[in-house]
Image (tube, helix red, strand yellow):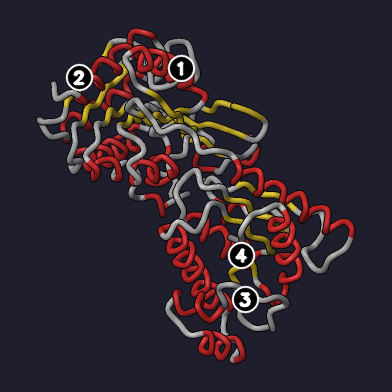
Amino acid sequence: MLMGTLDTKGLEVGFVRDWLERRGHRTIVVDAGVLGKPQIKADIQREKVAKAGGKSLKELIEDAQKGSDRVPIIQVMVKGAAEIVKQLYSQGKLDGIFSLGGSMGVAIGANAMKALPVGVPKLMLSTRLYPEAIGEADITVMQSPTDIMGLNPITNRTLAYAAGAISGMVEVQPLEKKTKPLIGITAMGVTTPGVMMLQSLLQARGYDTVVFHVNSEVMDKLVAEGVIDGILDYTPCELIRIFITSETPERVARLEIAGRRGIPQVIVPGGLDMIVLRVARDELPERYKNRKIYMHGPFVTAVRTTREELVRLAEVISDKANRATGPMAMVIPLKGFSEIDKEGKAFYEPETDTAFVSELTKRLKKTIVVKEVEYHINDEQFAEEVVRIYDQISKGGR
């Protein structure tokens, strides 16, 4: 499927369509434009997209002519494009999706792509990178060296490369279906040694594993789609960005998707000892300057979480764990939550970590397995205990 605003990007979409059809692919062109006259004919016209988004194209045009804010207009087309994409996929008519454009094209295309399952080929050709629109989705982004405005030798070559890329992606045969239970694991650098041991131990017990670095949006989507069978939330430090610094408040459902599906979960407080800020040390906000500081890189600064912040995280985790419908366990490494939270390292504060443990155990339901282990999170003995407990609860034991 090819998507674009055909009033301004029609010639370019047509170029990619023709290239793909010469290669033997069938194409469906969707017009997400609103105002100008389409430069090529669409298979799914803008009127249908607008209607799927909840308004008529006539209403959108009238709004635009009144000088209304573009955002509500774009939002209708965003919603409509996503609905069209879901319909085509459910009908077996979509094996891959390509879109191109500037800020409006990216907004519409990226949201349409996010409506598809993980693994469906998705390619975006954009005038510049818009990470806020792409998020964590499995979207391949190709940045155009020119504005996407008319055909010429430079733009044509870029379009041909993009057509070749999406063509190659859809021609790849799907991977074999899974034959083992698939376990999702969260990780970041300060828990990587422990996670690597988890992988080896789980594989020896007949599980497959897939690791997610810090962010969990794709993991939650795979859980919702029934692809992931269990969770080892070894590093739920994303909760800090959601509930402590409020950087990503839209992710308030973190820790809930797996709970609603009822799949086995083991939660470990990996990385909860630090707030990671993408700033240089001299740019650190004033409220953090009196804390313990660890420089992970020139523009990545970590600061130690406080007792109050860890108590708040314990409240969040216990509330979500108590509402889970499936088997659940908490495994606590009493000798530190990260590679720099251990004796002799920058963030070692056992009394602060103890506040988290006390609050968590006080709030959790009695049906939830809680195990405090006298090892560090990256010790082999701790990883062995986590895997043993996961295996136990997933098979109905306590």
Q: Nearer the viewer, residue 205 or 285?
A: 205
Residue at mark 4 = 3
Image quadrant in which you'd find residue 394: top left
Type of amino acid at the residue the image marks with label 3: Gly
Kindly identify which numbered label has been placed on residue 196. 1
Residue at mark 2 = 392
Q: Are marks 1 and 3 in contact (CB under 8 Å)?
A: no
The N terminus: image quadrant: bottom right
Circle nearer the N terminus (3, 2): 3
Residue visible at 78% across and 53% down?
A: 160
Type of amino acid at the residue the image marks with label 4: Met
Residue visible at 73% across and 56% down?
A: 22
Left or right, 28 with respect to 390, comes to: right
Q: Nearer the viewer, residue 77 or 291?
A: 77
Kindly identify which numbered label has been placed on residue 33. 3
Image quadrant in which you'd find residue 323: top left
Nearest-to-viewer mark from 4 and 2: 4
Q: Residue 391 in the image: state x and y as whole percent.
A: 24, 19
